[in-house]
Image: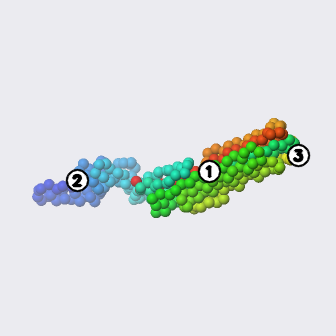
Amino acid sequence: MSQAAKTIADGSGAAVLAAINGTFSRFASMASGTSRPSDIEAGELWRETDNPGGGIHSIWLYDGASAVLVGLLDTTTHALTLVDSTTVRVQVFTSSGTYTPHASMEKCLIEVLGGGGGGGGCGTTAASSLGAGGGGAGSYSRSLKTAADIGASKTVTIGAAGAAGATGANDGGDGGDTSVGVLVVGKGGKGGKGAGASGFNNGGLGGVAGTGDVAATGAPGRAGIGIIGAISTCIGGDGGSSPFGGGGRGLCATTTYAATAGEAATGYGAGGGGATNLAAGGSITAAGGAATPGLVIITEFCSA
C-alpha cells in the first residue's frame, strides 16, 4: 500500500526506479492510507484504512472539492457495500392540483385515497327510535410508476368529502374519486342511509376497488339501529375508517325525546357518523356527520 507522489522527479538509477515503483503501488493499492493523499486530483479514488475500523475500509471519490463516500470494503469477507445515493422526496396533495416530478425522479410510489361518504340524518318521530347509517370510507390504491409514465406532469384530483345528511330523513352524500391522471384512482365511499320510516338503516358502502398495482375497497359504514313503534335506546351507525382517517361515531341516544347528530370524520377519506332520534316528536330532527376528503401521497426516488 502506498501514497507515494504521482510526479517523479528527475534523477537516475535506483532513485528513479524506486519512485516509479512507488507511483505504481499507489495506483495498485487505490492510494491506501489513513488520510487523503495531499496531491489527490478530481476523479481519483482512495482507500481509508482505519475508518470505520475492524477490517472495514472506506472507499472515497474526490470530486475536486471534497471526498464522496462510495462504499465500504470488508477486508475479511472481501465484500464491497456501495452507498445508496438515492434521494427520497415526498409530495402530499390535500387539494386538487398538478403533480410535477422532480427533475431527477426515476421512480415514484403513488398512493391515492377516495373521499368518504357522509352520515345519514334523522327525521322526526313521536313513538319510535331511529338510527341513521354511517358513511363508507373511500378506497385506497397504490402504484409504482417510472419517470416515463409521468412525463412532464399529471393532473391530481382530490375526491370531495361526502356531505352530511341534512336534518330529516336524508341520506349522506357520496364521496368523490381521487386520481393522478388515469394512472392511479381511489373511489369515493357512499353516504349512509337517512332514518325516517325505518328504525334500522344501512351504512354506506365503502369505495369500490379503483386503479393501481394495489387497489383495495373502502371500509363500509355501520348500520344505524332503532325500533319503529318502541321507545328504546337507538344507535347511529359509525362511519367507515380509512388508512389515513377515523370514521365519525354514530352516538348512542339515551335521552328520551331528543335527537343527536352524527359525529364528523377526521383525517382523510373517512365516513361520517349517522344521527339518532329517540322519540323526539314535533320538528326535532338531527343531521348526520360530515365525511373527510381524499388524499394523494407521492414518494419520489431521485438520483440527485
Among numbered discs 1 and 3, the one appearing first in the sequence: 1
**CA gap, disc 1 to disc 3?**
37 Å
Secondary-structure class at tag 1: loop
Looking at numbered disc 3 in the image, what kind of residue is underneath it? Gly
Instruction: Specify the amino acid type for callout 1.
Output: Ala
Of the two numbered discs 1 and 2 in the rendering, the one whose residue sits closer to the viewer: 1
| Mark 2, residue position | 4
Residue 160 is labelled as 1
Residue receiving disc 3: 229
Label 2 close to label 3 by CB (< 8 Å): no
Image position of 173 (left or right of 67):
right
Residue found 83% across the figure and 43% down from its top:
125
> Regarding mark 2 in the picture, which secondary structure is present there?
loop
Q: Position of residue 89 (x, y in %)?
A: 47, 51
* Residue at 39%, 52% in the rendered image: 56
Q: Which residue is drawn at 81% across and 45% down?
A: 130
Vertical placement of 221 versus 143: above or below? Answer: above
Residue shown at the point (61%, 45%) measured from the top left: 267
